[in-house]
Image (cartoon, grey):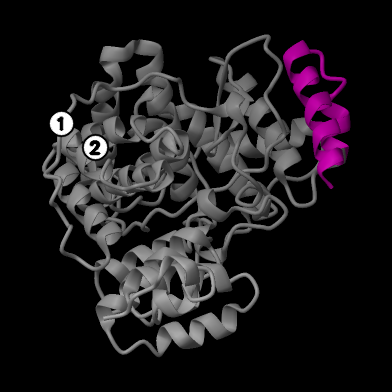
Amino acid sequence: MRYCGSMLLLLMLVACAGPCEDATCLGEAAVHDWPADPKGVTARVVALPDEMTRATVVSRLAEAFPGQTAGLCVALPRGVSQDRCQRLNNRPHLSFNPAAPPPPAAVAPVSGGAPAAMGATATGVFGPKEHSLPDAYLPVPPATADPALCSAVADRSACLDAEAVKAVVDGNAALANGICGGHVQQLWADECRFHAAEEAVRIRHGRAYAAAAAMCGVAPSFTQECWVHILTWLPKTVPPPEARGRAVSDAVDLAERVHAAWSSQGEDVAARHVDRFWALYFTHAYQQTRTPDGTPLVTYPEPAWPHVRAAAAMRMRELGLLHGALAEQTAQLGEALGRVEPPGPAAHGVEPVFVYVKDFGPPAEDGATTFFLNSARRPVAADPALDMLFCVVVTAAHADPPDTALLAEAAAYPDPRVAAEARRLRSASAAAR
């Protein structure tokens, strides 16, 4: 047995401590050394012979340096530890660099599977607070999780995350909240709640939505991102615009579930979440077509129509189908939306992915607004002709490059809301270039 006399304590501190061999010590050492020598730390972590120790060390590194340790994930056994490592390295909200575009996997695909030309619309940063969902929260009753849960597991963080997912899938947001509270740091407790909500919706879709939305509300670090993520993953697949029958009724059912979940918080809150759902849904729908038309205007309910117009206009602009002066482009959009595809065989959809939208700030306060594709907002009008005008103007600013001639023309339009929005977007898009 080693003995360190009090008079020799300072001289013999290192010797008394002994070699760094346990998982906790190795993890702290790896975190300390990473900034100066990530390659060296990677090599020695990968070389650790014990899988349990390696899982603990990688988990500590992934938490300390999210977005930087993806190469270590492959050193873990397949399962919850590797899944968590990969997730923490792919979370924009944990390691987002505002100067960099989002990773390709986070961009909505164009037809053919390539990254979207929504370069325009699917690159940039998360929307600002003005574009957020309402600060209203679904109740989550207090619940205490078993304090011994996951205590015997090497990668306790990954185990807690997996148990929380199970609880939300079972509809028990309170238990999941308690389980995530087992994380030592608030950041990782909230990430656990975010992940549980998101994963439950991926697994059970509409059936898990209410519990997932409640979980987002108890993850204050990520609540807004969480609500948008679960709306994104709510449909298992999104069909193309010409879809009929079951595909449409399934989407309507999802929108109704969203409304039902939030109805206790007031009609405005519920409608805003439904609004965001349709914005995301039709962004994905129209990315699948090279001939946008107005079929959804006769197959989907009226609350979806502003998002049909906006997504169709953006897709037409991406495809070069909007050109000329303001009146010409509005007519081109109107002609496309006036076409209705005849019923055909069931259409296969695409799995939803993240949609990013450039931030040009909020529209003028005079008049109603709605979400544009995702986090941005645009003016909206009950009159379809005026609403198409707004869509043409807004998509002109989000084009790559922007249609500056159209914005200049629209800035002098007789309708004051159209002119004000064109002037605002003209200035904002110029500043963004």
Residue denoted by label 2: 177
Find the distance from the CA under tag 2 to the CA under tag 1: 8 Å
Q: Residues within 10 Å of mark 1 (few under 14, many from 20)?
A: some
Tell me the quarter of the image containing the N terminus.
bottom left
- Kindly identify the residue that appears in the image at 31 percent across and 48 percent down: 183
Residue denoted by label 1: 143
Amino acid type of the residue that numbered disc 1 sits on in the rendered structure: Ala
Q: Secondary structure at mark 2?
A: helix
Residues 182 and 357: in front is 182
Q: Quadrant of residue 395?
A: top right
Image spot of residue 180 (x, y percent): 27, 44
Q: Residue furthest front?
A: 7
Q: Which residues are magenta?
A: 405-433
Q: Is residue 213 above or below residue 84?
A: above
The secondary structure that most of the magenta stretch takes on is helix
Amino acid type of the residue that numbered disc 2 sits on in the rendered structure: Asn
In this rendering, the count of numbered labels is 2
Mark earlier in primary sequence (2, 1): 1
195 displayed left or right of 390: left
Image spot of residue 30 (x, y percent): 49, 73
Residues 190 and 396: in front is 190
Image spot of residue 211 (x, y percent): 22, 34
Q: Secondary structure at mark 1?
A: loop
Q: Is residue 399 above or below residue 6?
A: above
Image spot of residue 336 (x, y percent): 56, 41
